Amino acid sequence: MEKIHISEPTAHNLISFDRPNNQEWKEVFNQVKYQIETDGYCVIQAGSTDRSVLLELAKYFGNPQRSLGSDEWGIAEVSTFNNGNKNILTSQNQYLSNTAQEFPCHTDGAFLLGIAKTKDGRLLQISPPKLVVLQMVNTAEEGGASVLVDSQRVLEDALDWDSDLVKVLLKPCVAYARGDQLACSSVFERISSETWRIRWRYDFTTLVEESAGDAIKLFHSKYISNPKYQKRFYLQPGEILIVDNFRVIHGREAFKERTEKSRLLNVVWIADTEKFFINPVCQLKYQQVYDLYEPYTNAEVENRKPAISVCAGIQLSPNRQAIAKQLLCELL
């Protein structure tokens, strides 16, 4: 029987359990949920690089969300060898993930904020995925380490020492533009009474209000690119990294390719909770903008209630929560 292991990426005390579903499977998935909610990420040793294993695992956490580079199942290949999903963004080299250069820490889908019309005629909000699931298939000859930054820890420290900076980060002063997509947002956004999320890129897609430019540069240099907040490790073939995309910023070091095969990751986005819109005067008409977001609707897989409901996002201590809310109120 095939074994699956779960562990911290640098730990050797792996927990193994058999597939398919049984009580041991459920117990270990409870630990997966705990690690994601505690640390913002989890690494699973799945013992296979087969795409079906990735998709099976991903569906336990929710519905896969498509992207421009994904197939109908929501799986995208990240490699310097283009996988055939050629489009204008690929030709313009707007996919840093498909190069061997450093890919700075970011949240996936930072440029997404729109509405698409589903096949049943409903209007679905399109936003960044809740979770990102990455399966290592082939490693590089040299380099290519994964880099994670826990923005919960970053925000906690910034609230303690740089409240004026945080006040800027709570303002909708940043825009992320890629291709025909554009999202205007704050860096940190309150998504429920006690939960926050980060939307972040720091590259050619990032646009900032002139008055906030120095603050964004300071935030990047003092926190995001500070080794104190970074965790680096190498994913091995068969390992699957699950990242809370509302909390953990992820990136990749530059690397040198092998001569015989390219570094390859399979990636699946797990959609956020579905939110639908209506026209209040019952005069809904076709809008061209809906078509721009259709490629980001949920994949053609069986929709089902997630077996593992992960509470994604940034959870602050009561004192820091109060400070953040006060700063937000001062912006009103």
Image (cartoon, rainbow, N blue to C red):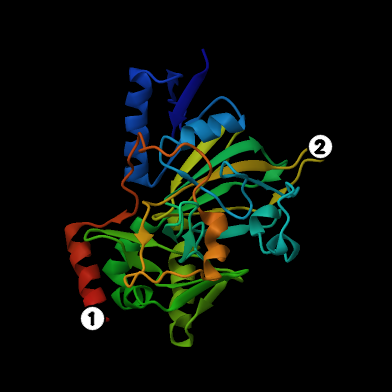
In this rendering, would 102 be left or right of 223?
right
Label at residue 205: none
Determine the residue located farthest toward the top in the rendered image: 1
Which corner quadrant of the image does residue 189 belong to?
bottom left
Label at residue 260: 2
Determine the residue located farthest toward the bottom in the rendered image: 211
Camera-side residue: 203 or 304? Answer: 304
Check disc 1 and report its element: helix, strand or loop. Answer: helix
Q: Which residue is mark 1?
A: 330
Which corner quadrant of the image does residue 219 belong to?
bottom left
Camera-side residue: 21 or 172? Answer: 21
Dot 2, crowdedness within 10 Å: few (<14), some or many (≥20)?
A: few
Determine the residue located farthest toward the right in the rendered image: 259
Looking at the image, residue 18 lies above or below residue 320: above
Q: CA distance from mark 2 to mark 1?
A: 57 Å
Which amino acid lies under the numbered mark 1 shown in the image of this protein?
Answer: Glu
Asked if disc 2 and disc 1 are in contact, CB closer than 8 Å, the reply is no
In this rendering, would 289 be left or right of 98?
left
Residue sitting at x 39%, y 55%: 247
Residue sitting at x 45%, y 19%: 20
